[in-house]
Structures are given as C-alpha cells and as structure tokens.
Amino acid sequence: MKILIFGGGQMGQAYHEYYSNKGNDVQIAQGVDIRNSEQVTKAIEEFNPKLVINCAGKTNLDWCEQN
C-alpha cells in the first residue's frame, strides 16, 4: 500500500518505520507546509497514496504555552 506521511518528526518517523517494515511504499512529504492547501494537494497528486497520515504539529513548546 502507498502511504504518504505529513510531518517528519518523531511520530512521522515512527509511522514510516512501522509501515515500511510491513512492506508498504511509504514516503514522508518533504518541504510541505500543511497550512498551504496547494502544497498538500500537489504532494498527494504526485505520490498518489492509498492512505495519508498527518503527523505535522507545532514543536515550539514555549510558543504553544503562550499562544
């Protein structure tokens, strides 16, 4: 199965490893800002996945606490 993952942090890497080890064709979308619908659409159209997993998140904890 073709799987596209948005977000290459700890969770994205864990999903990539897990599904790759199961024999799936897995790709992490590089350089895609999930707030930009055109970038997301382009990444999905180019890879044509059966499943999309979103692991993107804000990682600046200080900013998150304040906002």
Image (cartoon, rainbow, N blue to C red):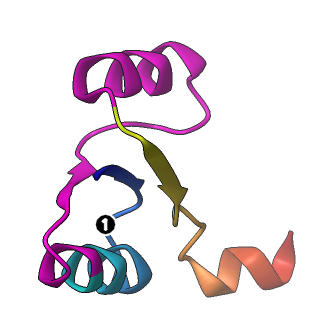
Q: Is residue 26 magenta?
A: yes
Kindly indicate the quadrant of the structure image that contains residue 39.
top left
Residue drawn at the location 59% of the way across and 20% of the way down: 37
Q: Position of residue 50 (x, y in %)?
A: 42, 41
Q: Position of residue 54 (x, y in %)?
A: 55, 57
| Figure check: 1 above or below 63 | above
Residue drawn at the location 35% of the way across and 37% of the way down: 49
Q: Is residue 30 magenta?
A: yes
Kindly indicate the quadrant of the structure image that contains residue 32.
top left
Residue drawn at the location 39% of the way across and 27% of the way down: 44
In the image: residue 52, left or right of residue 31:
right
Residue drawn at the location 51% of the way across and 58% of the way down: 53
Q: Position of residue 66 (x, y in %)?
A: 84, 78
Q: Which residues are magenta?
A: 19-48
Q: Residues within 10 Å of mark 1 (few under 14, many from 20)?
A: many
| Figure check: 43 above or below 65 | above
In the image: residue 56, left or right of residue 24:
right
Dot 1 corresponds to which residue?
8
